[in-house]
């Protein structure tokens, strides 16, 4: 088959298909305007082949608009398969190729870096080499994964969908889809005409002057319910038109038509889905067509506005309009009647209500008359009752006031007494507080004075003791000794002699002086001292209080001068004793030296003198010991020689005397204060007892008076309550007949209201009757109107649609079949790992070759451009018409001839790489 | 109205007598009603003595002399000066008596009494209310409402311009009522009767000769709890159409949800008792309509 053959075949077939018709179609109206040259060709071929009548060629196949290079159908299948496959391959390759690029680039980089590191003996070279190995492994894994997930074609093929063209008597034909069921148009039409027939009599029997309202209503409702009877049984009101809409069938005109012979039809029928309808099934469609044509001619007459033409439809439609108008008028009359009835009922009801008002008025008159009758009695009762009340109140108010005045007088007296007692108590309490403070002060003072006097007394006693009993320790008298180991005093005898003489003289002189002192001492008188000692003894033997009588003696002690003289004498004697005691020792030493000197000199002559001297010395010793014993025997004190001592003594005694006097006075004060305090306490307790007595009395008076007042109040209330009670009783007695009359009135009005309710009930029932009739009739009327409108709309819609499709004026003039091709493909994909099947079908209208650059492996691998060099044009409207997405496809079959692949590659329709890939993957 | 007036009130009013007479059981009533003055007139001695006794017992120290002299006694005024004659009781003694009016007469005031009796040929321009009974003689006209708390009898040739209401209503002869008639008990007619509407609570009994009829302006005749017994024609509506007793008489029963149900026959006995039901005679509907409405009930839902 040469490349030009399909074109010729197609055009011939197109011409031949039209050859059966006597009229050549006006091709200017054909929507297929994509090939303007077609018209000329068709005309030319048609005139040339006018004799080649092929009446049997009533089947066509739709062809897509391809380039002339496309000379065979199998190549088209292959091209579509590759185009679909390539588009899926690209979407698959898009996300995966970047991993492969990355690993393929990293592997040599790491390898080179590792080798350079080995050459330079760098320590990280091992890491690079390991990285190179790792990326190489990853590259291999990615390649394996890519190969594993490469899409696979599971099934591919071409199928056909058949359309039928039905010839119309008045010219033209229409495409219909034999797979869509035909609606029950005759049934629809019968319903429509039945409606007109049934409504013919509707409302015509109504006569406004007819007074038989019941009969009118009955008839109207019966007619309406008859009218809508079909509505309740028919469910096919919403049936859609069976025809492909005109704007949608335009899609079919985009296809080229190829006439088919029996062999082609048999071949194509194998690929048609679903199974084409049997021959007899077209008949209902043809019948329907003629029905619609008949009806549309009816409608045409109306549409043209030929009022004079009395078509059946025209007549019966006008009649139905009029009848429904009649029914509507009747129903409106019912409404008016219902309104009138309602008003009448309301007036009835209001009259009945007036009865109640009138009864109330009448009863009110009698009641007011009765009230007038009893009014004087009631007023007098009120006056008497008010008089009694005021008198009782006055009496009890007076009683209460008397009681209260009495109570107030007693309470005032008690209050005054209470105040006085309180004042006395207050004064005594103040005095007691002052005295207690004073007593405390006096006690403090007494303690202080007591301590002071004790100290002074002790000091006085000590001082007296010191003065009278104390004495000095005198050194004992030295005794003459001859054994002092002293060196010889002199070396010469004359000197010895002289010294001896002097020694004797000195001894004598000393003895006489001592004796003089002794004499003077012996002449001393110690009476003042004794007197003082006696005083000390007297004072020390008793307490300080007992000593107070002696203190004046001590103060009056005048012998202090004598005591001073005694002290001087004693002191002089003591100094004499002490001087001559030392003189004795010196003389004794001198004697011993002289004795040694005499012995050494051997001057025994001087022994006598020495002995004499010794006697003198012993005499001195004797005198001294006498003096010593005298001095030791008599008490004395050097203090006496000081005048300050006595002054001190006097001061002490005088102070003690004075303080003792004070202490005595203080004790008296304290005793007096304590006495006064005890008196005050007795007075206070007496006053408190009086006050409590006063309080008790006050409470007693108050309680008694309150009880009396409460009793009065109780009586008062009791009498008033009884008065009120008696008054109410009396009033009830007076108004007894009025109360009974009011009860009668209430019962009567209740009776009237019961009657009112009965009347209202009657009105309600009447109104409900009317409303029920009205509602139903209104509803029926609406149903009938809508039924008529629906039927008319439906039928006129079908007719209008049919007419529109006829006016498309197709070239096909015979009842014929048209096969429209579609391609399905099913792929097995692995988006990540799991397998997924993708299946779809497409319709194409055209295929166009594109000029592209030469193919190469680099371009194939490193770009995402398509590997097919042509463009396929899809049509979604056609897909919808064929319902390709709802078909079921055979699985596992790939209907494509093997040599078509090579043909496509050789003629630069596709890249060789995708062929290789497809073959390898397949 | 002019015709009726000329028919019944051509006579000149001759005299008006009004007499009070004792009620049916008046002779044996309480002695209080026999005294010339009612017991509330100047009779507070009982009250005073009771009160003073109580005071003396309650408080012996109370000075009873305080209660003896009321220096401001209430002076009763005679406010009952009668200006015009009234036709209703104005005192206790009159309350239980019967008002009897004898005609021919014209009364220009409302009439109210325990028992009201109009002998005949009387025209009353006002309402007539009888607490226990009303009896209207022949050829009377009431230009107001006629209300009775008990029995109500209307004689031949009477006309009422307002509403008629009573417990038991008995009508004899030709009577016309321009307003509605409400009867709380049984309604009995022996003659011809025209009214705006008629409602009875217990029953309606219509009897008379062949010429007699009952005519109502309303489209329905309603008995709330009872039945209609009619032997004379019944004309309903303004057009006076004759009601068909065989097809337009319904028994009405109330459902618990407030709706009503109409039936051709009385509802059946339940537990030996017939449920409370009314009767309605109407020209508004019929059984066929009800059937059809029941058939079409599916559309209504």
Image (cartoon, rainbow, N blue to C red):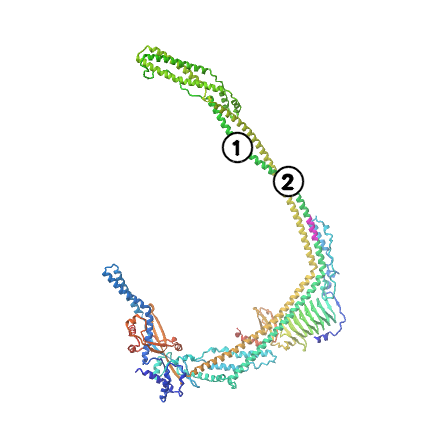
Q: Can residue A558 be seen by looking at this rendering?
A: yes
Magenta-drawn segment: A388-398
Q: Mark 2 vs mark 1: which is more N-terminal?
A: 2
Tell me the subunit letter for badge 2: A
Looking at the picture, tell me which residue is in the foreground, A688 or A596.
A596
Farthest bottom residue in view:
A51
Q: Compare residues A88 and A316 and report the one nearer the observer.
A: A88
Residue indicated by mark 1: A444
Element at label 1: helix
Where is residue A605? Give x, y as percent. Answer: 33, 10
Residue visible at 24% across and 62% down in the picture? A116
Of the two numbered discs 2 and 1 in the rendering, the one whose residue sits closer to the viewer: 1
Q: Residue A448: x and y, percent? A: 51, 31
Which quadrant holds the C terminus of chain A?
bottom left
Left or right of A816: which side holds A772? right
Q: Is residue A67 above or below residue A389?
A: below
Q: Position of residue A426 (x, y in %)?
A: 60, 38
- Chain letter of mark 1 equals A
- Provide the secondary structure element on which disc 2 rests: helix
By secondary structure, the bulk of the magenta-drawn segment is best described as helix
Task: Quickly name the residue at label 2.
Answer: A417
**What label sits on residue B21 in the rendered view?**
none
Q: Position of residue A137 (x, y in %)?
A: 27, 65
Gap in angstroms between the C-alphas marked 2 and 1: 41 Å
Residue A618 can be seen in this image: no
Is residue A680 inside the magenta stretch? no
Q: Is residue B247 above or below residue A138?
A: below
């Amino acid at each position: 088959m040469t490349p030009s053959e399909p074109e010729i075949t197609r055009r011939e077939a197109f011409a031949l298909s039209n050859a059966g018709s006597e009229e050549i179609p006006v091709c200017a109206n054909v929507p297929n305007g994509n090939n303007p040259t077609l018209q000329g060709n068709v005309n030319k071929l048609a005139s040339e082949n006018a004799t080649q009548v092929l009446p049997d060629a009533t089947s066509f196949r739709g062809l897509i608009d391809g380039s002339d290079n496309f000379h065979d159908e199998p190549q088209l299948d292959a091209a579509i398969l590759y185009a679909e496959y390539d588009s899926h391959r690209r979407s698959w390759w898009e996300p995966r190729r970047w991993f492969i690029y990355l690993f393929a680039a990293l592997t040599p980089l790491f390898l080179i870096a590792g080798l350079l590191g080995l050459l330079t003996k760098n320590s990280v070279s091992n890491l690079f080499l390991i990285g190179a190995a790792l990326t190489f492994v990853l590259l291999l894994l990615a390649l394996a994964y890519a190969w594993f997930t490469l899409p696979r074609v599971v099934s591919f093929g071409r199928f056909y969908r058949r359309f039928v063209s039905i010839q119309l008597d008045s010219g033209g034909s229409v495409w219909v889809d034999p797979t869509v069921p035909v609606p029950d148009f005759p049934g629809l039409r019968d319903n429509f005409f039945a409606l007109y027939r049934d409504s013919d009599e509707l409302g015509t029997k109504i006569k406004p002057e007819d007074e038989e309202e019941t009969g009118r209503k009955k008839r109207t409702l019966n007619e309406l319910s008859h009218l809508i009877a079909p509505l309740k049984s028919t469910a096919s009101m919403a049936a859609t038109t069976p025809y492909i809409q005109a704007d949608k069938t335009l899609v079919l005109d985009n296809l080229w038509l190829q006439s088919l012979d029996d062999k082609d039809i048999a071949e194509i029928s194998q690929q048609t889905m679903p199974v084409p309808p049997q021959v007899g099934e077209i008949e209902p469609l043809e019948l329907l067509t003629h029905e619609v044509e008949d009806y549309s001619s009816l409608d045409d007459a109306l549409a043209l506005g030929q009022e004079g033409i009395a078509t059946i439809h025209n007549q019966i439609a006008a009649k139905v309009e009029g009848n429904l108008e009649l029914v509507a008028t009747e129903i409106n009359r019912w409404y008016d009647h219902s309104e009138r009835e309602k008003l009448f009922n309301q007036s009835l009801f209001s009259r009945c209500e007036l009865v109640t008002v009138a009864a109330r008025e009448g009863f009110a008159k009698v009641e007011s008359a009765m009230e007038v009758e009893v009014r004087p009695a009631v007023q007098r009762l009120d006056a008497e009752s008010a008089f009694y009340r005021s008198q009782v109140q006055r009496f009890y108010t007076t009683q209460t006031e008397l009681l209260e005045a009495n109570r107030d007088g007693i309470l005032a007296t008690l209050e005054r007494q209470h105040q006085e007692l309180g004042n006395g108590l207050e004064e005594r309490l103040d005095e007691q507080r002052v005295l207690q403070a004073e007593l405390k002060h006096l006690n403090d003072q007494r303690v202080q004075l007591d301590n002071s006097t004790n100290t002074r007394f002790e000091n006085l006693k000590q001082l007296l003791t010191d003065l009278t009993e104390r004495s000095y320790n005198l050194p004992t008298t030295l005794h003459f000794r001859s054994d002092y180991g002293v060196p010889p005093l002199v070396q010469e005898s004359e000197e010895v002699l002289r010294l001896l003489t002097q020694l004797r003289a000195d001894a004598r002189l000393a003895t006489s002086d001592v004796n003089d002192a002794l004499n003077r001492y012996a002449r001393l008188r110690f009476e003042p001292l004794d007197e003082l000692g006696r005083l000390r003894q007297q004072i020390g033997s008793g307490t300080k209080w007992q000593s107070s009588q002696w203190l004046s003696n001590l103060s009056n002690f005048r012998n202090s001068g004598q005591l001073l003289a005694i002290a001087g004498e004693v002191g002089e004697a003591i100094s004499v004793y002490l001087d001559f005691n030392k003189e004795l020792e010196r003389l004794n030493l001198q004697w011993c030296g002289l004795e040694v000197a005499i012995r050494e000199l051997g001057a025994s002559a001087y022994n006598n003198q020495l002995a004499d001297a010794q006697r003198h010395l012993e005499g001195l010793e004797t005198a001294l010991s006498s003096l010593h014993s005298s001095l030791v025997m008599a008490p004395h004190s050097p203090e006496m020689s000081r005048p300050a001592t006595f002054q001190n003594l006097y001061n002490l005694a005088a102070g003690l005397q004075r303080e003792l006097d004070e202490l005595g006075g203080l004790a008296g004060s304290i005793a007096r204060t304590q006495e006064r305090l005890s008196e005050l306490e007795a007075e206070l307790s007496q006053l408190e007892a009086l006050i409590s007595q006063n309080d008790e009395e006050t409470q007693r008076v108050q309680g008694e008076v309150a009880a009396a007042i409460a009793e009065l109040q109780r009586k008062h209330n009791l009498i008033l309550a009884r008065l009120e009670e008696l008054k109410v009783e009396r009033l009830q007695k007076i108004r007894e007949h009025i109360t009974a009359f009011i009860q009668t009135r209430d019962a009567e009005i209740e009776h009237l209201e019961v009657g009112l309710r009965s009347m209202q009930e009657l009105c309600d029932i009447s109104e409900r009757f009317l409303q029920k009739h009205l509602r139903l009739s209104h509803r029926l009327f609406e149903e009938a109107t809508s039924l008529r409108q629906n039927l008319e709309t439906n039928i006129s819609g079908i007719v209008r649609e049919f007419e529109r499709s006829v006016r498309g004026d197709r070239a096909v003039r015979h009842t014929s079949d048209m096969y429209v091709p579609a391609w399905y493909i099913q792929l097995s994909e692995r988006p990540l790992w799991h397998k997924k099947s993708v299946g779809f079908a497409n319709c194409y209208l055209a295929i166009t070759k594109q000029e592209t650059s030469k193919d190469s492996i680099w371009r194939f691998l490193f770009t995402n451009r398509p590997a097919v060099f042509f463009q396929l044009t899809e049509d979604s409207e056609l897909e919808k018409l064929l319902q390709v997405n709802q078909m079921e496809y055979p699985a596992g079959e790939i209907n494509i001839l093997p040599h078509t692949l090579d043909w496509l590659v050789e003629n630069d329709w596709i890249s060789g790489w995708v062929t290789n890939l497809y073959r390898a993957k397949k | 109205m002019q015709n009726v007036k000329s028919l019944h009130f051509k006579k000149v009013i001759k005299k008006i007598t009004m007499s009070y007479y004792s009620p049916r059981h008046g002779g044996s009533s309480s002695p209080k009603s026999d005294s010339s003055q009612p017991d509330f007139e100047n009779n507070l001695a009982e009250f005073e003595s009771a009160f003073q006794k109580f005071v003396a017992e309650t408080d012996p120290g109370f000075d009873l002399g305080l209660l003896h002299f009321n220096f401001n006694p209430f002076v009763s005024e005679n406010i009952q000066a009668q200006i015009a004659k009234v036709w209703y009781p104005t005192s206790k003694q009159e309350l239980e008596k019967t008002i009897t009016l004898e005609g021919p007469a014209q009364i220009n005031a409302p009439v109210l009494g325990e028992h009201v009796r109009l002998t005949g040929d009387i025209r009353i321009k006002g309402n007539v209310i009888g607490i226990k009974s009303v009896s209207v003689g022949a050829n009377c006209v009431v230009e107001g409402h006629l209300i009775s708390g008990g029995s109500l009898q209307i004689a031949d040739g009477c006309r009422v311009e307002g509403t008629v209401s009573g417990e038991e209503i008995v009508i004899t002869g030709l009577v016309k009522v321009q307003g509605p008639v409400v009867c709380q008990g049984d309604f009995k007619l022996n003659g011809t009767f025209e009214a705006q509407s008629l409602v009875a609570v217990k029953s309606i009994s219509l009897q008379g000769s062949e010429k007699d009829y009952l005519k109502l302006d309303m489209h329905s005749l309603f008995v709330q709890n009872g039945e209609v017994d009619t032997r004379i024609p019944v004309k309903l509506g303004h057009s006076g159409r004759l009601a068909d007793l065989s097809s337009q008489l319904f028994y009405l029963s109330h459902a618990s949800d407030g709706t009503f149900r109409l039936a051709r026959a009385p509802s059946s006995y339940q537990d030996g008792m017939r449920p409370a039901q009314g009767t309605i005679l109407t020209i508004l509907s019929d059984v066929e309509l009800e059937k059809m409405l029941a058939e079409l009930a599916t559309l209504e839902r």
